[in-house]
Structures are given as structure tokens and as C-alpha cells.
Amino acid sequence: MRILHTMLRTGDLERSIKFYTEILGMKLLRQRDYPDGEFTLAFLGYGDESDHTVIELTYNWGVDRYEMGTAYGHIAIEVDDVYQATAEVKKRAGKILREAGPMNAGTTIISFIEDPDGYPIELIGKK
């Protein structure tokens, strides 16, 4: 068994694809419209779905925003250098929620950024 993808609903598919590709450096792996269901799915990631976990963006036609809810936490992405990755996100006009630094009550270096729909993303340094 393995995790295939994490699904996030988006209110603006093109804006979200731009964020994940241009700010986080993912590739758009595939995209498909489902006219009978009135939604579009886009899959993005750092490698082929056959051996990488990816993000599934779901755009329900005509819905431009969602309530975040209190159960959702965040997506985590491993990076070589959290300070450098956070600076790159800032340079590309990404939103920083927490600057790079040691985690609370620990030594792991992390930062938090936010995607265009308000989903938090944790950047974690390689161990």
C-alpha cells in the first residue's frame, strides 16, 4: 500500500496550478474535465504518479471558495534548505505564514506558507 494523492478543492484552478508549478516547482501531470459532474481534476507533483504522491486539485464548476474547517492541518514538503526555499517563495510573491526557523520545542527547521485557497503548507528541512 501507498498514499496516492491528497485532494484539495480550489476556487480558481488556473491560479492554483500557477502557484503549485511556479512557486513550489511542481509539474502539472494531468488534467481532465468531467462535464457530467461539472468538475475538473488536475494532478500535480514532483515526479510521476507511479512512484510519487501527488496533489489532486478539484475545481467544482461555479464554486469560487470553500470554508476551511477546523480538522484540516497542512501539507508537508521536504526541501534541502528551508531558509532558501522560504526566501524563494517570498521572491515569487508567495504568502509566508511563518518564517523559517526551528520548530516549537524542537530543532527541526520549518516554515509555513499558504496556497491561494488558504491551505497551509509546511516546508521541512531534510534530515
Image: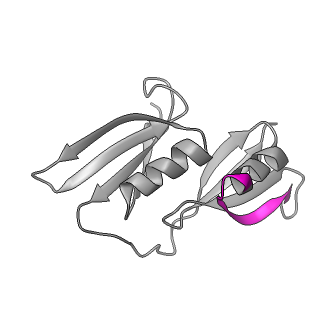
- How has the structure been colored for display? one colour
Q: Nearer the viewer, residue 4 or 82?
A: 82
- The picture quadrant where one finds residue 104 is bottom right
Q: Position of residue 11 (x, y in %)?
A: 37, 65
Question: Total label count?
Answer: 0
At x 38%, y 61%, the residue is 12
- The picture quadrant where one finds residue 43 is top left
Q: Residue 23 vs residue 103: left or right?
A: left
Q: Position of residue 114 (x, y in %)?
A: 61, 62
Q: Nearer the viewer, residue 78 or 3?
A: 78
At x 63%, y 49%, the residue is 76
Q: Residue 101 vs residue 116: left or right?
A: right
Q: What secondary structure is the stretch in magenta mostly built from?
A: strand
Q: Residue 45 vs residue 112: left or right?
A: left
The quarter in which the N terminus is drawn is top left
Q: Position of residue 52 (x, y in %)?
A: 51, 29
- The picture quadrant where one finds residue 115 is bottom right
Q: Residue 52 vs residue 24: left or right?
A: left
Res 119 visible: yes
Task: Find the magenta span and give its range.
Answer: 91-102
The quarter in which the C terminus is drawn is top right
Asked whether residue 97 is drawn in magenta, I would say yes
Q: Position of residue 82 (x, y in %)?
A: 80, 47
Q: Is residue 88 above or below residue 63?
A: above
Q: Is residue 62 above or below residue 6?
A: below
Asked whether residue 103 is drawn in magenta, I would say no
Res 3 visible: no
